[in-house]
Image (spheres, helix red, strand yellow):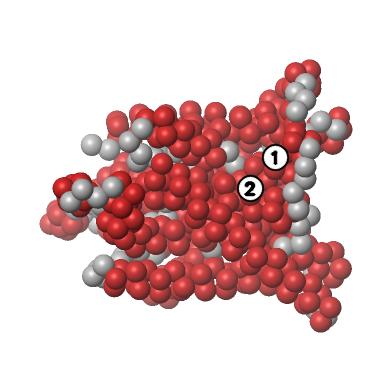
Amino acid sequence: MEWDWSAVSDFMPQFWDGLLVTLQALALGSVISFALGLVWALLMRAPSRFVRWPVGVVTEFVRNTPLLVQLFFLFYVLPEWGVTLSALATGVIGIGLHYSTYTMQVYRAGIEAVPVGQWEAATALNLPRVRTWQVVILPQAIRRVVPALGNYVIAMLKDTPMLMVITVLEMLGEARLFAQQHFQFTEPLTVIGVAFIVISYLASLLLRSLERRLVR
Amino acid sequence: MTSGLWELVIKGIWVTIQLLVLSALLAAAVSFVVGVARTHRLWVVRFLAGVYTEVFRGTSALVMIFWVFFVLPPAFGWQLVPMWAGTLALGLTYGAYGSEIVRGALKAVDPAQQEGGIALSFTPWQRLRLILLPQAVPEMIPPFSNLLIELLKGTALVSVMGMGDLAFSGNLVRLALQESAEIYTYLLLIYFVIAFLLTRVMRGLEKKLKAGVGKEPTREVQVPQPVGGGV
């Protein structure tokens, strides 16, 4: 096995570019998945089953099909429908949508874990429904689910390389580009592999300390 | 779509299913070996198993696939057939996730059961085989079922390497027909049907195994553990 340190240092500028794109995609994807997941979770508690049923089917479908194919779908079909987005935007939407179907269940568990007495107290105080959600239920539910949501951010980090297939130059995309230009595969691929391990390990340490502070 | 193109898709389904079965077997083997090793009494064994889990869980499945396809061949001087390379990458990655499931289920068995085994002077291997696993395995089925769906979704990644699985054949058909919406809808539906069937099979398995230890299958909705969650 030949290891060439000069290839590593040559790759570094591209690595930082890729890291930046990966983190951007991760941050935006997280925001979309957190927001959309909450929307799904609230819709699943709607009184009418004509709301619950379609939402349930759609999210189940999205959760059980490969993100890769969903990305292809968005990337090739949206332009046919007249929506042109940059590759990164498409990828962020795809990854956010996919993970919203997971975060939705996290929120659901969090909402169900709020003691029923809280609901009863809100009713007794004659709080309107919207206020009940805003100031009683959601603050307690979300506090509980932050660590679980963080887990999904780490999972999402490991799915960002898929954005490569729709031409986004994130870490893996940069590594492949570098490998093809210089015909050196070992170094860039190993560098980003190690980078993924380091980032997700640090993130999990961060989460553990967050969990200690939030969940008591 | 013409019948020739459908044939291509059916070939793709076959490759996906082969890859799914092979990598699920490898992942199951890895899960049990590493999961049990993490409860071993020697700290070296526990430590090594922990390192394995952290490393393979920490990296991305797609990066792993690239690594197996591009770095292993020049490093060791041999090249795997794509099917085995795909199996290796997916099996090792998802096995690391599975080992956490095995470890958790083993830890959840009532300690009195373990102590009972010691009191009856069972060897560690007998305790594992006759006392711990029969009680722990049924509890592993629901999380394993979720992991199997994740693995099915993961098999689509090998199409990036040009392996002719379902996602790859879908891309070929798209190039031939230039009708993206239709083809990708079909692809997603096929994956969904496979996932649905897998869930059914796993639910049947759970019922059967739990009946063997006198338990009811869980009815509550499982929150799928994130694949690769760090905590």
* Chain letter of the residue carrying label 2: B
* Residue type indicated by callout 2: Ala
Asked which secondary structure carries label 2, the reply is: helix
Label at residue B25: none
The image shows residue A120 at horizontal and vertical percentages of 15, 57
Within 10 Å of disc 1 (Cα), the crowding (few <14, some 14-19, many 20+) is many
Residue for point 82% across, 64% down: B172
The image shows residue B84 at horizontal and vertical percentages of 69, 54
* Quadrant of the drawing holding the C terminus of chain B: top left
The image shows residue B152 at horizontal and vertical percentages of 58, 61
* Quadrant of the drawing holding the N terminus of chain B: bottom right
The image shows residue A141 at horizontal and vertical percentages of 30, 48
- Residue at mark 2: B89
Residue for point 78% across, 77% down: B7
Marked residue nearer the N-terminal end (1 or 2): 1
Is residue B93 in sight in this rendering? yes
Residue B210 in which image quadrant: bottom left
**Contact, mark 1 vs mark 2 (Cβ under 8 Å):** yes
- Residue at mark 1: B67
